Every structure is written in structure tokens, then in C-alpha cells.
Image (cartoon, helix red, strand yellow):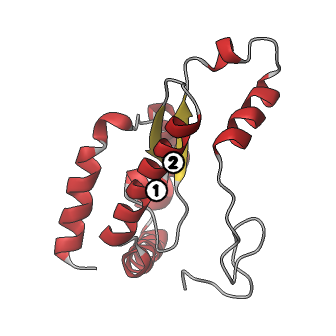
Amino acid sequence: MSKEDDLVIVEECKRYAEKYMVEQNIAAIKQFRKYYSSHFADPRYAEEFRMLSDEIFRRFQRNRQTSAEFRRKMVMIDEIGKVIQKNQSWRFKLFPSGSTMTGLATKGSDLDVTIWCPDANRLFSNESEKEVCMKILKSTVVMAPWPSGCDARGGTRGRNPSA
């Protein structure tokens, strides 16, 4: 992936920054440091950790999402919004989330989407939360055939795309 791709992804993420905010889990960071800091200081493990870190970084760089994939995902968010708006009079917002927005997405990774619909409780006030979610899902999701090479859960069959 080129430096230009990196810059495009950074700029695209800035466009969506107000939609997705990441908050650090300080307690988890402190707990990790408490339990594992001695391993990082031990020279026997320090080199192994460095080598592992380098390999993880190289693998990620080889397999990271391209700017074109990122743009396709943002177009998909817009298209989903158009489908919801066409079929319903709900107030709603769609928020891309997960690895796509944190910058950790890899080639062919999924797109996590959060749908904010403040009217859902009013529209479905006498139904359980699960039933509300199922009605929203059924009225907004467009089913498409599974891509070849994928199983019903979206996983790959017999190949490792990130290797």
C-alpha cells in the first residue's frame, strides 16, 4: 500500500470522525502493564516480543484495507441509508464502526454498522427488544447471494486470505 493510500484513508476517516469516537480503556491498559511489564523488561523476552511485534506489523501492512475498499464501504453505508429512508419515515443515522474506522481493517474485512433510530421504542413500544431488532432488520436488510468461496457465516472455505 502506498503513502498516497495511507493519506487518502486518513483524510476519509477525518470526514467520518464526528460519527465514530474511540475512547481508551485506561483500566485495561493499567492492568496489562501491571501483569506484563516484567516480561517486557526481561532481556530474555524483550527480543522475542520485538520480533513478534515486527512480524505482526509486516503481516498487517501486507494485508491492510486499501483506500478503494474503504471508499466502497462508505458508499455502502450511504446506500443502506437510502434504502432505509425510502422504505421508512424513521429518523435514523448510520455509523460505520469497528476495524474500518479504527484503521485496523484488512483486505476483504467486514463493515460494522450501527443504526441509531430514536423512534424505535415509540414505533414498537409493546414488543420485546429482540422483536424490535428483528422488525428493523427485516425491513431494512437487502439479502444478497453469498459470494463464492464464503460460507453462510461470511467466513472463507479452505483458504486463509490474510496469509
User: Front-most of 33 and 97?
Assistant: 97
Q: On screen, 74 above or below 122?
A: below
Question: Pointer 1: residues within 10 angstroms few (<14), some, or many (20+)?
Answer: some
Query: Are the two marked residues, 1 and 2, in contact with CB atoms closer than 8 angstroms?
Result: yes
Q: Residue at x 54, y 25 (%)?
A: 89
User: Does the rendering let one see residue 21?
Assistant: no
Element marked by disc 1? helix
Q: Residue at x 49, y 28 (%)?
A: 92
User: Front-most of 105 and 146?
Assistant: 146
The C terminus sits in image quarter? bottom right
Question: Pointer 2: residues within 10 angstroms few (<14), some, or many (20+)?
Answer: some
Q: On screen, 138 above or below 150?
A: above
Q: Residue at x 51, y 48 (%)?
A: 80
- Separation of disc 1 and disc 2 at Cα? 6 Å
Residue 157 at what x, y percent from top left? Answer: 74, 83
Q: Which residue is mark 1?
A: 76
Element marked by disc 2? helix
Q: Which residue is mark 2?
A: 80
Q: Residue at x 23, y 72 (%)?
A: 5
User: Front-most of 1 and 73?
Assistant: 73
How many marks are shown on the rendered structure?
Answer: 2
Residue 72 at what x, y percent from top left? Answer: 40, 64
Q: Amino acid at mark 2?
A: Ile
Q: Amino acid at mark 1?
A: Met
Residue 130 at what x, y percent from top left? Answer: 80, 30
Is 62 positioned to the left or the right of 149 in the image?
A: left
* Rendering quarter of residue 16: top left
Is 151 positioned to the left or the right of 11 in the image?
A: right
Residue 126 at what x, y percent from top left? Answer: 81, 12
